[in-house]
Structures are given as C-alpha cells and as structure tokens.
Image (tube, rainbow, N blue to C red):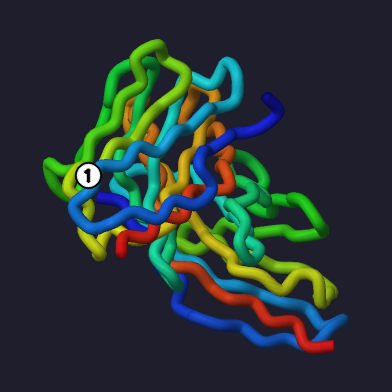
Amino acid sequence: AQSVAQPEDQVNVAEGNPLTVKCTYSVSGNPYLFWYVQYPNRGLQFLLKYITGDNLVKGSYGFEAEFNKSQTSFHLKKPSALVSDSALYFCAVRDRNSGGYQKVTFGTGTKLQVIP
Amino acid sequence: GAGVSQTPSNKVTEKGKYVELRCDPISGHTALYWYRQSLGQGPEFLIYFQGTGAADDSGLPNDRFFAVRPEGSVSTLKIQRTERGDSAVYLCASSAQGANTEAFFGQGTRLTVV
C-alpha cells in the first residue's frame, strides 16, 4: 500500500521569507512524487513532479521540491514567499513499480498562510 | 477542450434521490480518475479508468456508487439513494498514458444532499 503524510495542517510564513511544506511518503517500490496547489473553490493545479534524476525539482511559480530517498521525503520549498502563495498544498505519490496501474494517493493537505 | 470539464458545478439533491455527475477529460487522455474531497481533507480515491474499463474501483464506498466510461472519453459517476454523508466535492482528473504523468483536475462538482 502507498501513503503520504503531511505532518503540518498549517504553515505560517512572513512575506519574503523562505517557506517549506513537509511531505513524507511510503511505497513498496520506488516513487513518483507530485505536488499540487488548491486555491479556494478551485480544482487542484499541478506544481511539480519527481520522476528520476536530479533530486531537486523545479516547478511552477518559483516552487521547488527536494527528493530525499533515505528520509522518504519530498518537501516543497520556495526561497521567498508571496502573499499570493497562500493556498492549500497537497503532496501525492504513485508507486513506480505499479505495473501500469496508476492510482495516485494524496496527503491530507497543508494550508499555507503568507503574512504580509 | 483545453482542460477537464465537470458538470454540473453544483448539485443540490434530496436524500434518497439519484444523481449523475459528468466528467469530460482532456482529449487523448486514456486515464481518468474520480476522487472525493470533503472539507479540510485531501482527495480520496474512488475509481480509476484506463480506457473504457475500470482498472480499480476499490475506493467506491459502497454499491450505491457506480461509474462508467463507455467510449473511453466522457465518464459519469452515478450515486443511487443519496445520503447526507455523500455531500462533498467530487473531483475528476485525467492523465496521459504512463505512470510518470501528472493528472489534470477539473473544478469539481459540489454535491449537497439535504
């Protein structure tokens, strides 16, 4: 079985400061990892994904995430937060060795609040 | 269309009634997913289609829920004898073939059972 944990329900950060949203995962094989963002009353928007190669992945809106296999983590980061980054962030995982089966499992989400 | 389209955007129904929720995926996407999201929660997997067939329906909560994708494109999620606990946002997503591809989500259908 695959699972994702987002240990923080909410993260508060001052505008201009760096931000980190944490995610850890569990899969039986190797993972594909994803981050999505959800603004109020909107669907989920894809931010970035880790497939293979460089452990630091860059995505939309200046976000990046670092894959750490030994810690089974995929934390989302941004060097300088904007008020407009305030939203709900979801980490997701798919088992690479799923034999073509593509179920994606999502975490419970972390609310990011950027304070002006 | 350019993205995943879900209709209706909002649906209010009385307890015990039957509802259908429609999803029109991105053209050419073979994989289609239904998720359910309750307030303050992450998306909960319901069912996954690869083409016309349901590859995994293990997330459907009970036999009141059923989904079809007869021509491998549009999908309909059907809920019989709705209950107040079915109230949630139902999300549809589609992706291209391949486990490394990201899913693209629709705006969701907010279902309220009164």
Drawn side of residue B95 relative to residue A104, left or right: right
Rendering coords of residue A53 (x, y %): 63, 40
Horizontally, residue A44 falls left or right of residue B92, namely right
Viewer-side residue, A2 vs B35: B35
Q: How many circles with numbers are drawn on the protein? A: 1
Residue A70 location (% of width, % of height) = 46, 61
Farthest left residue in view: B63
Which chain contains the residue that carries disc 1?
A: B
In the structure shown, which secondary structural element does the residue marked by tag 1 occupy? loop
Q: Residue at x 39, y 16 (%)?
A: B51
Q: Residue at x 42, y 49 (%)?
A: B90
Quarter of the picture holding the C terminus of chain A: bottom right
> Quarter-wise, where is residue B112 in the image?
bottom left
| Left or right, B25 with reference to A5 | right
Which of B36 and B11 lies nearest the eye of the viewer? B11
> Which amino acid type corresponds to the residue marked 1 in the rendered image?
Leu
Q: Which residue is mark 1?
A: B60
- In this picture, is B60 found above or below B49? below
> Residue B48 at x, y = what percent?
34, 33
On the rendered structure, is B60 left or right of B36? left
The residue depicted at 30 percent of the width and 44 percent of the height is: B46
- Crowding at dot 1, Cα within 10 Å, few <14 / some 14-19 / many 20+, comes out as some
State the image coordinates of residue A96 (x, y, percent, origin top left). 41, 36
Q: Is residue A15 above or below residue B90?
A: below
Which one is in front, B5 or A97? B5
Q: Residue at x 46, y 47 (%)?
A: B91
Question: Residue A111's image quarter?
Answer: bottom right
